[in-house]
Amino acid sequence: MKDVTDALIDRLRGEVAGPVLAPGDKGYDEELAGFNLAVTHTPDVVVGLMSEDDAVAVVRAAAETGTPVRVLATGHGIPNPMQGGIVVTTRRMTGVSIDAEAQVAHIAAGTQWAEVIASAAPYGLAPITGASDAVGCIGYTLGGGLGPLARTYGFSSDWARSFRVVTAAGDVVTASETEHPDLFWALRGGKGGFGIVTAMDFGLVELRTLYGGSVFFDAEHIASALTTWAEWTRSLPESANSSVVILRLPPLEFIPEPLRGKTVLSVRFAYVGDAADGKRLFQPIRDAGPTLIDAVGEMPASDIALIHNDPKDPTPSWDRGMLLDELDAEFVQAFLEVAGPEQQIPLIAVEMRHLGGATERDVPEGSAVGGRSGACTLTLIGVPDPNLFDKVLPATVDGILGRLEPWVCEETTVNFAGGFALPGSYEKSWPADTFARLAEVRAAYDPDSLFPFGPRQENSGS
């Protein structure tokens, strides 16, 4: 096997323009570094793709030797180590071009959302992105994607118009509504195991401003504000989007002084429409109690990442995610009992995103997205101490979810499945018929499982 690996590496170095690095080579660890610093990947070789031709060369060499291939961009969506085989990185394949007339962005494989947002803004256009603009566009979209405007515009994958894909046969194909429609269906929400996506055409919306931002409540007002939020979301129009998160913040200088060292509730809001209407809709949240910070107002659509203001620097991370059914007063009581401000738990954030509206409706031609039946997401993020990752955080979250079990959806969505760490989370990431059809499409385009995907063989390409 060692001889085969050496021969494969030699071949790749002769055919690929980008770096080809084996364990022990200078730059190997740096090439594999992603957003989650707690994850260490150890493939037999890592290849930094410079172009689609590089991707083709890697796939053809891998197919001839039976060597598995996995994809790494920003590493936001890969919580488990990738071991053995080939890992290709796409961070050098960046770039965006805007067709303003067609309202489409052409996005290269390693591009992050910030570049797309900035490129579209001068035309009064915006992509339907995730909460963080530092996330890779392709991997995020392949898993569906639930961003700050999801209730208004749906899953981000609903806006994918086509993909360029290097298949297991080493062919470059376009997957769209009219070309390879079965593959196009699968790539909009099916996540991985289909090939290397080298580019994507993505639809844009006309959007210059939002009424949005976030407010923060101190610990003593969390129960009132959260109760108000749960009831308030029941009557919001699709033009209104919201989420809440309980944050247990350390006393560090980079945290705004009013929040430093406190347990707080942040309510985020994004309204598409007239600012006066947005202000009126948001008033019940302001009336729920005094706030430490109120940063909700009219804002450029290009500043959408400020609503969640997620960290952009790499860090060790641990999380679990799922979907919830419709929230009620009993849920709020149960939630506060296990995750409220009085609980001493090693979780830095417990977040819920209000769904419904456009997320419930599939695109006319159909897509593989799972989770359209969910009323809310639930994400639990642990304190970034790797010493807690193996036992303490799983036990804490198991206890919380045991209390919340009556409200947990049978179905989830793959971007919130936490790397399939929980038994059954892989199968629950899609409806049963979608799960079965995805297996058929993978078998058709990758019969020898060159691109492994599943609970122990992640290929998220995020």
Image (cartoon, rainbow, N blue to C red):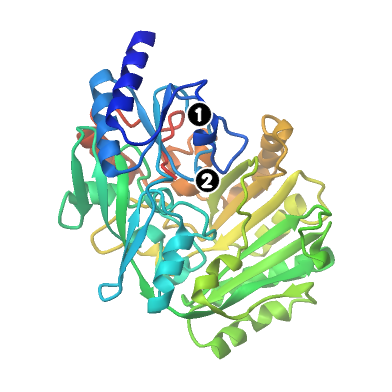
Image x and y of residue 235, in percent: 54, 77
Q: Is residue 179 left or right of residue 195?
A: left
| Residue located farthest toward the left when viewing the structure as drawn | 178
Q: Nearer the viewer, residue 191 or 92?
A: 92
Residue 56 image position (x, y, % from top left): 25, 36
Can residue 412 be spotted in the picture? no
- Which quadrant: the C terminus? top left
State the count of labels.
2
Which numbered disc covers residue 119? Answer: none
The picture places residue 213, in percent across and down from the top left corner, at: 62, 73
Please say whether residue 107 is visible from this viewpoint. Answer: yes
Q: Amino acid at mark 2?
A: His
Q: Is residue 321 left or right of residue 8?
A: right
Q: Residues within 10 Å of mark 1 (few under 14, many from 20)?
A: many
Q: Residue at x 40, y 60 (%)?
A: 156
Query: Label 1: which residue?
Result: 28
- Residue 370 horizontal side relative to residue 376, left or right: left
